[in-house]
Image (cartoon, helix red, strand yellow):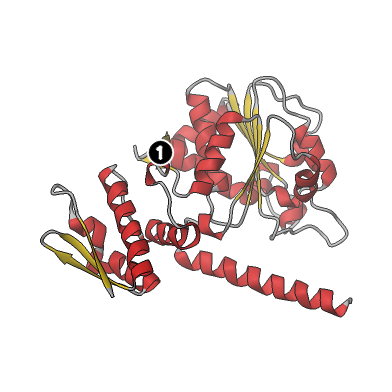
Amino acid sequence: MVKRMIEIPDNMDTAELFGRFDENIKLIEKAFGVNVSMRDDGVRITGEETAVERSGDVIHTLITMIASGEHIDEQKIIYVISMEQEDGGLDPKKLGADCIAINIKGQPIKTKTFGQKKYVDAIDNNTIVFGIGPAGTGKTYLAVAKAVMALKRREVTRIILTRPAVEAGEKLGFLPGDLQTKVDPYLRPLYDGMYEMLGGEGFLRYQERGIIEVAPLAYMRGRTLDNSFIILDEAQNTTPEQMKMFLTRIGYGSKAIVTGDITQIDLPGDKRSGLKEAMKILGGIEGIAFCKFTDKDVVRHPLVQAIIKAYAKYDEEKERKRKMKNG
């Protein structure tokens, strides 16, 4: 058994570090099998040498994040722990350092994982970016935030939000109302992001003036989209023909973000996913970037991460059995 002491800055609120009822420290103790306690001269960690070293690095990382103004919650602690367990360390200064946007409440929008940071950096440095990964990783939300900031900075003159509606579930013709009413349920995630960035009234004003356009993917055919920030959501449900059609709409001064989850394809069994095909065809082209998220990038409830892992394990086992059966 070894001990390690970590000094806490005098002006730091230890309640932020330890959490309510010490819940933050309990997560660290459970993850590494150590004992963590507060002392007058700092935090004391007791346990096996390697576990003490790694848990100490986690606590030091959290202290650094708090000192830089970051709010520590369960998701961030779990992420820092997972990075330490897998990679043996991380640089907290690279995480959440930059403000991507300011939402309607005046709160800064920042990256919460390194996968998200790579994604945002790719958006800044490329014309077309594919964000591929499971639900809850912020693919659409961050794309919407970047789109709104680009519009406010006059880097683009309009935002176009699109999504393949028909293939994702219920047919449009079966839903009541006019076309916009039929399309709205499929585009709800995009609306939610816009409402958070601009507020309901602000979004509607932009939409009425044609500065923000929300339309099904089929409406992109035959158009050239100049000076636009275009987001194609749920791209795993495009066909190869639709994906090619969309990508060839991009004009001068435009940027396109394509998001999707290849584990949740709703297309009929005889149709190929345009997203999966694009991943094979477009790799290595300058100006196009592919960002792949994992379960570690999930920023929703911790159970979402566990659910994604469980399904991935189930699918892997099913695929293994299928290969064994087919010889």
**Residue 75 quadrant:** bottom left
Viewer-proximal residue among 275 and 324: 324
Q: In which quadrant of the rendered image does the C terminus lie? A: bottom right
Give the total number of marks visible in the rendering: 1
Q: In this view, does 108 lie to the left or right of 86?
A: left
Q: Position of residue 63 (x, y in %)?
A: 27, 51
Helix, strand or loop at label 1? It is loop
**Residue under pointer 1:** 103
Rendered location of residue 99, percent (x, y): 40, 36
- Give the residue at the far left of this rendering: 40
Quick check: 187 above or below 251? below
Residue at 17% from the left image edge and 65% from the top image edge = 38
Up/down of 62 relative to 194, above or below? below
As drawn, is 305 to the left or to the right of 81? Answer: right
Residue for point 19% across, 57% down: 14
Q: In this view, does 170 lie to the left or right of 195?
A: right
Q: In which quarter of the image is residue 255?
A: top right
The x, y position of residue 250, in whole percent, is 72, 27
For the residue pair 229 and 168, the one nearer the viewer reads as 229
Q: Is residue 41 above or below residue 10?
A: below
Label 1 Cα neighbours within 10 Å, binned few <14 / some 14-19 / many ≥20: some
Residue positioned 83% across, 45% down in the render: 240
Task: Report the residue at 18% width, 53% height from top.
Answer: 13
